[in-house]
Image (spheres, rainbow, N blue to C red):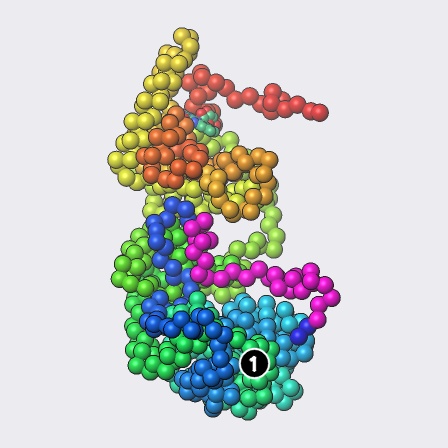
């Protein structure tokens, strides 16, 4: 294993890069505070219908596990995995803990990971002191000291044939390299796959996970399968009592339960087919997977992630692959129904082209990245000035509907707005429901009457003539709230000024204003409303701060001059009146 000079140095290796995992329902709750509970957790590749727990004797909890049950578990696991003997099998408290142990079997050198895959492999290899490269072609693994791959791969399900892997192992062995094959998802099929029967030749470590297929991830049980000498080294590094008494008892029973294993393989395959049907019905392309999960690639992956999150369905996203989403299997019929409904609702609001993945695979991984450079010419600058000058607060709308998807596309633009700490605290509520719209109109009428009553004698008659909202005619309505509780942004920039969250939401509003006007669409800001009442009418979390209510539609007229100026209420000042120098 690598020796670090300081704890800080070791921790740097542990922490970098930050690895995001599925299964964090606490994070889902934080991200989607208004979502219906319980969450449907599809963010892992764990069988949602676990092996039934046997009754356990108190001894398995009370006493340190003895050698005989451990040997028995190794024997049963060897039979289940097709390993030559129990001497080839090392049980561990999950395979995760084995990753740095196995990476440390090779002196620090060059580790190559067949990527993209489970991110902990690269982290563990780094932790063991290796220089890690992530490669996309299996041939590029051959000259590494430590070659790591997952088969079938997570998240795309790529399955490499045993022959190919054995040829790779031979090439590695020729220069003393080690091949690590993580078969965490292989139990779900295909049945004939797996390298456990081939480890005697040396230079191969196979990892088998118990928790995923048996749906008992919390039990923490996994195995390394290797030639006996290597297995012995791994066992020695783990030390005695690595596997708990309950894990020994349950693992031994489950791995010997052939009938359950076969029936479960079949059930998982059927469930995966059902998942495919739901995803395909929503127009999504399935990029791969195993019977425990499916991967989709879509331009709308980010929107879909949030749409599902708001519906209380948590799927796995991949920060460096913005078009990818991984779906695990729902556990029971109500969960399937929730997924079906949420997917159908999403598909109904998306142009099909948006749901497909970008055709250009290269752009896929950089879709979030800025283009290398961007410049704007004089003509554009002149048009931008026009846009700023001609943007209007619109209150007189035509009733014509907006083209389908317009509002969604504008809200996507809004997400490009600046926000404190990149917190993106804006929350958009699209208001389609006629009863809610009527309630908003009623609230506006009441608040506006009060505002009129509060006008001075000289201003009251002019105020009464102003049209201060287009709530009747505008075809599209939405409200904007600021989520002051969001943890996105990690609090940056709002410790001394928490109101920065509200200001950030306002930047999104202005972005929509401009983006809409660029399409000839007008927006009107309605602020003559009671925020508490609006929060109730729209049924949103109480701690969302109401920013404004907005009408969108085609304007009856265009004008360079604000309507309030034309009505003689107020006029626009030029900069000198609002600028001072210090
Ligand atoms: C925060 C904010 C709230 C507003 N609320 C209202 C409103 O309730 N009713 C209204 O008629 N206009 C409202 N407006 C629109 C302003 O009156 C309008 O922006 C201003 O008169 C300048 O006109 P222009 O936007 O066309 O340049 C609001 C604008 C802002 C920025």
- What range is drawn magenta here? 3-31
Identified at 61% across, 61% down, the residue is 15
Observer-nearest residue: 6 or 159?
6
Identified at 48% across, 31% down, the residue is 390
Identified at 38% across, 43% down, the residue is 407
Mark 1 closeness class: few <14, some 14–19, many ≥20 residues within 10 Å: some
Vertical position of residue 256 compared to residue 443: above or below: below
Q: In the image, is residue 367 part of the stretch drawn in magenta? A: no
Observer-nearest residue: 165 or 72?
72
Q: Relative to 434, is 521 on the left or the right?
A: right
Quarter of the image with the C terminus in it: top right
Disc 1 on helix, strand or loop?
helix
Q: Quadrant of ligand 1?
A: top left
Whether residue 350 is visible to the viewer of this picture, yes or no, is no
Asked which quadrant contains residue 188, the reply is bottom left
How far across and down, in percent of the image, does residue 46 sit? 40, 68
Residue behind mark 1: 235
Observer-nearest residue: 509 or 236?
236
Vertical position of residue 45 compared to residue 198: above or below: above
How far across and down, in percent of the image, does residue 399 sit? 30, 34
How far across and down, in percent of the image, does residue 361 sit? 49, 65
């Amino acid at each position: 294993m690598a020796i670090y000079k300081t704890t800080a140095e070791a921790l740097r290796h542990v922490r970098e890069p930050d690895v995001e995992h599925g299964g964090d329902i606490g994070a889902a709750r934080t991200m989607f505070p208004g979502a219906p509970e319980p969450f449907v957790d599809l963010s892992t590749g764990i069988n949602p219908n676990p092996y039934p727990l046997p009754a356990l004797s108190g001894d398995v909890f009370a006493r340190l596990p003895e050698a005989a049950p451990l040997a028995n578990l190794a024997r049963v696991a060897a039979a289940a995995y097709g390993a030559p003997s129990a001497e080839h099998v090392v049980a561990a408290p999950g395979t995760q803990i084995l990753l740095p142990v196995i990476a440390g079997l090779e002196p620090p050198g060059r580790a190559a990971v067949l990527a993209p895959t489970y991110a902990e492999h690269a982290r563990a290899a780094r932790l063991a002191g290796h220089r890690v490269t992530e490669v996309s072609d299996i041939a590029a693994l051959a000259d590494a000291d430590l070659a790591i791959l997952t088969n079938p791969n997570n998240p795309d399900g790529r399955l490499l044939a045993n022959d190919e892997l054995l040829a790779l192992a031979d090439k590695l062995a020729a220069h003393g390299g080690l091949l690590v094959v993580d078969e965490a998802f292989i139990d779900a099929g295909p049945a004939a796959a797996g390298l456990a029967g081939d480890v005697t030749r040396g230079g191969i470590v196979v990892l088998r996970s118990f928790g995923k297929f048996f749906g008992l991830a919390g039990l923490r049980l996994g195995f390394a399968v290797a030639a006996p000498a290597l297995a012995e080294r791994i066992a020695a590094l783990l030390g005695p009592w690595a596997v708990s008494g309950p894990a020994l008892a349950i693992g031994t029973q489950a791995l010997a339960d052939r009938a359950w294993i076969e029936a479960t393989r079949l059930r998982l395959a059927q469930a995966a087919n059902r998942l495919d049907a739901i995803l395909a019905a929503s127009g999504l392309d399935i990029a791969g997977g195993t019977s425990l999960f499916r991967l989709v690639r879509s331009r709308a992956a980010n929107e879909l992630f949030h749409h599902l999150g708001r519906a209380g369905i948590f799927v796995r996203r991949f920060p460096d692959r913005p078009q990818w989403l991984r779906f695990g299997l729902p556990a029971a019929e109500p969960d399937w129904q929730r997924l079906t409904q949420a997917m159908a609702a999403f598909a109904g609001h998306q142009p099909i082209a948006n749901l497909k993945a970008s055709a250009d695979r290269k752009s896929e991984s950089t879709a979030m990245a800025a283009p290398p450079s961007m410049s704007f010419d004089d003509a554009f600058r002149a048009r931008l000035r026009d846009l700023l000058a001609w943007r209007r607060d619109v209150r007189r709308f035509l009733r014509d509907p907006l083209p389908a998807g317009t509002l969604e596309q504008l809200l996507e633009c809004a997400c490009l707005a600046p926000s404190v700490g990149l917190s993106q605290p804006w929350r958009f509520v699209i208001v389609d429901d006629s009863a809610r719209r009527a309630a908003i109109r009623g609230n506006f009428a009441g608040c506006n009457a009060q505002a009129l009553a509060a006008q001075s004698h000289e201003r009251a008659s002019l105020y009464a003539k102003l049209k201060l909202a287009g709530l009747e005619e505008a075809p599209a309505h939405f409200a904007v709230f600021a989520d002051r509780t969001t943890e996105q942004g990690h609090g940056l920039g709002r410790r001394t000024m928490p109101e920065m969250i509200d200001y950030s939401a306002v930047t999104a509003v202005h972005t929509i204003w401009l983006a809409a006007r660029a399409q000839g669409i007008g927006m009107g800001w309605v602020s003559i409303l009671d925020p508490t009442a609006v929060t109730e009418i729209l049924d949103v979390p109480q701690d969302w701060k109401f920013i404004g209510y907005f009408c969108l539609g085609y304007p009856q007229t265009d004008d360079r001059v604000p309507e309030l100026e034309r009505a003689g209420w107020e006029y626009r000042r030029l900069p000198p009146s609002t600028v001072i120098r210090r």
